Amino acid sequence: MTTAILEPPLSRSGPSFLASDRTRVALTHGPLLLRTRGMGRWHRPRSGSSWTSGYDGEEITSYYLWCGQQVGSGNKTTTGEKGFITAASLPDDGVPICGTCEGRAIGAGYQGIAATVHSPAGLLFQPERLVPPKVCPGTALRLYDVLAGNRAALCLACGNTEPLRGYSNAGGGWENLQRHPPGPRLVPPCGFHGWRGMARIGDAVRCECTAGPSEPES
């Protein structure tokens, strides 16, 4: 079946410790087109994730569409049915394709499904992607170990050895790692929060969304 490459489901929200978030998986591929039975358009999925329901143990899959809507396998349609239907090629059921989804996907660099665009300026849409930041998160998140001599530190986020600097404001002074570009050993990003939620967890640096409390014993 033809599948679509999906963008990472990045979120501006902070890491959560909900049980569903600890089972959540960021999907890298999804259906070419999808819609609920109550939708009047076929839509192109932009990102997706799956997780296990904490209520009944059901496996749930959810997609964010390029036009901004969200559909999930647990959503009820206007006809009372649950879930969505998918298409692996251009549908022939007479239901049109969402023009917003098509235009945004083409503008972001994906191949068009139903539209041919003739424009000198072309189309442009810049989704947030897992591109390494220009400034290593080790400084903002204070992820470092001070080395002997107290003048430099090992950045735990990227593995670089960087100088320590003194900073101050009206509230007082403090010491922190110097701002620096990420080194070649930058920790892998979280599929949901990129490098924004990184923390020292045990002997490793990883996103806080993977550090929730263990499930209580029954």
Image (cartoon, helix red, strand yellow):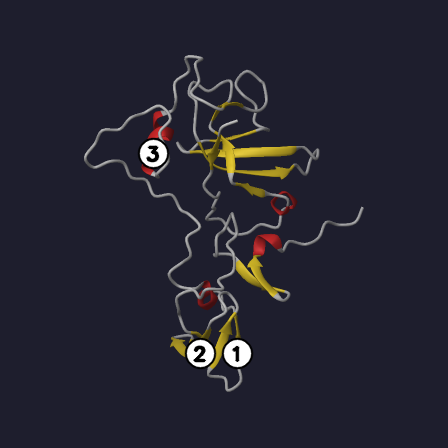
Sequence order check, earlier mark of 2 and 1: 1
Sequence order check, earlier mark of 2 and 3: 3
Sequence order check, earlier mark of 1 and 3: 3
Image location of residue 122, percent across then percent down: 24, 36
Mark 1 to mark 3: distance in Å?
47 Å
- Please tell me which residue is depicted at 75% across the width and 50% down the height of the picture: 216
Q: Secondary structure at mark 3?
A: helix
Q: Is residue 189 left or right of residue 50?
A: left
Q: Amino acid at mark 1?
A: Val
On screen, residue 28 above or below 101: below
Q: Secondary structure at mark 2?
A: strand
Image location of residue 7, percent across then percent down: 45, 41
Q: Which residue is mark 2?
A: 164
On screen, residue 140 above or below 27: below
Q: Which residue is mark 3?
A: 106
Mark 2 to mark 1: distance in Å?
8 Å
Q: Amino acid at mark 3?
A: Ile
Does the CB distance between marks 2 and 1 fall below 8 Å? yes
Image location of residue 145, percent across then percent down: 54, 75
Label count reads 3
Q: Which mark is residue 146?
A: 1
